[in-house]
């Protein structure tokens, strides 16, 4: 009989120890089995999964190579899915959403604000030339970035010519497209600049001030949300989630000096989980803890549905909720 793990965290990043420890704590408190798959275990874990020696109910996938089919973490996520385990996020959806060229057009079609952009296919690099109209559209200098990439690899924020495309292609050889994008200039908001790193975790949006030069985070307070009229940030993030179908991700959004918001980094499928208590430019610890809880809560909800009497308990709570909603509607109608 296969040994079944309720929750498996899959990540190649050794600096996510704080995140992994908090997740293991919650699993222990709720009597759920847990395993951390890292570079030491990923190949052996995958082999044991293939041979049905082990099974996985829920996998939290924090990797960054979703379009590299031979990546061991990608293979692992796909195998868990093939065996009807639940992967957060689905590796097929993640691979599409993390491709900036693919997602760019979908965001445009959904009226989600993005900077003026020109997409250049790989096979046109070396021959592509901006027209006068295109230069007027994106301005000079402009931004060049690979459609498939992460951690700023292949990104040039001060590009003056098409030669930057070749440089970007050298840095990100696995990308099939490259984006030429208008540079955005963040507005000054008190002691902050209007640049935000936004977390989306299962419908909950967590806004942070983010400095693109120092990569330092700071939580946006409710008072700042009102003072600087930042409510569009949440609406934009929920729009990105709807279009991309992603459950956990971060995005970068800039409030430009023209007063408009622009999404400048669409979907980061492996949100930064380095805590500030260990890293100067890390995420505030309270956010890391909250993200761990949100992911754990969702995973636990999935796992408990397969644990016998918990099914009745969950069904009962849902039935009670339905009854309460009906009762509220009846009272509202009676009041009218």
Image (cartoon, helix red, strand yellow):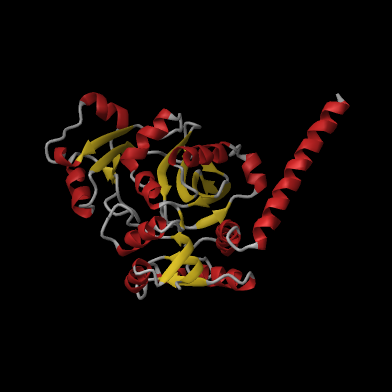
Q: Position of residue 30 (x, y in %)?
A: 63, 69
Q: Is residue 136 positioned above or below 39 on the image?
A: above
Q: Residue furthest right?
A: 335
Identify the residue at horizontal 38%, vertical 52% (top origin). 91
> Does the rendering let one see residue 274?
no
| Quarter occupied by the C terminus | top right
Identify the residue at horizontal 63%, vertical 45% (top origin). 224
| Quarter occupied by the N terminus | bottom left
Q: Is residue 85 positioned above or below 17 on the image?
A: above
Q: Position of residue 161 (x, y in %)?
A: 20, 39
Instruction: Give left or right: position of 258 versus 222.
Output: left
Instruction: Give left or right: position of 88 versus 284.
Output: left
Q: Residue furthest bottom?
A: 40
Q: Residue furthest front?
A: 1
Q: Is residue 116 positioned above or below 307 on the image?
A: above
Count of number-bearing discs? 0
Q: Position of residue 231 (x, y in %)?
A: 60, 38
Identify the residue at horizontal 17%, vertical 43% (top origin). 163
- Between residue 241 and residue 214, name the one nearer to us: 241
Q: Position of residue 285 (x, y in %)?
A: 57, 64
Instruction: Give left or right: position of 121 versus 322.
Output: left
> Does the rendering let one see residue 84?
yes
- Between residue 124 and residue 331, name the one nearer to us: 331
């Amino acid at each position: 009989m296969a040994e079944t793990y309720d929750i498996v965290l899959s990540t190649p990043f050794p600096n996510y120890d704080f995140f992994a420890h908090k997740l293991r704590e919650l699993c222990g408190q709720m009597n759920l089995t847990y395993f951390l798959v890292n570079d030491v275990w990923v190949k052996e874990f995958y082999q044991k999964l293939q041979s049905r020696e082990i099974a996985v109910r829920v996998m939290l996938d924090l990797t960054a190579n979703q379009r590299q089919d031979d990546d061991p973490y990608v293979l692992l996520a796909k195998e868990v899915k093939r065996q009807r385990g639940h992967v957060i996020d689905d590796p097929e959806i993640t691979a599409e959403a993390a491709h900036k060229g693919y997602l760019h057009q979908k965001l445009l079609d959904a009226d989600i604000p993005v900077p003026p952009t020109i997409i250049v296919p790989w096979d046109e690099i070396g021959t592509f030339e901006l027209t006068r109209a295109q230069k007027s559209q994106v301005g000079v200098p402009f931004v060049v970035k690979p459609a498939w990439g992460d951690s700023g690899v292949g990104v040039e924020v001060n590009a003056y010519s098409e030669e930057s495309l070749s440089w970007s292609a050298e840095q990100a050889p696995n990308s099939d497209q490259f984006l030429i994008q208008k540079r955005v200039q963040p507005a000054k908001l008190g002691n902050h600049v209007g640049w935000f790193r936004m977390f989306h975790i299962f419908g909950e949006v967590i806004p942070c001030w983010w400095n693109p030069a120092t990569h330092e985070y700071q939580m946006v307070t409710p008072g700042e949300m009102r003072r600087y009229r930042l409510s569009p940030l949440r609406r934009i993030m929920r729009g990105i989630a709807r279009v991309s179908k992603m459950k956990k991700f971060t995005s970068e959004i800039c409030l430009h000096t023209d007063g408009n918001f622009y999404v400048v980094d669409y979907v980061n499928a492996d949100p930064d989980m380095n805590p500030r208590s260990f890293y100067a430019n890390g995420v505030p610890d309270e956010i890391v803890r909250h993200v761990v809880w949100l992911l754990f809560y969702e995973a636990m909800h999935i796992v408990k549905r397969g644990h016998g009497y918990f099914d009745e308990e969950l069904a009962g709570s849902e039935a009670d909720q339905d009854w309460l909603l009906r009762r509220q509607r009846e009272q509202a109608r009676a009041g009218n």
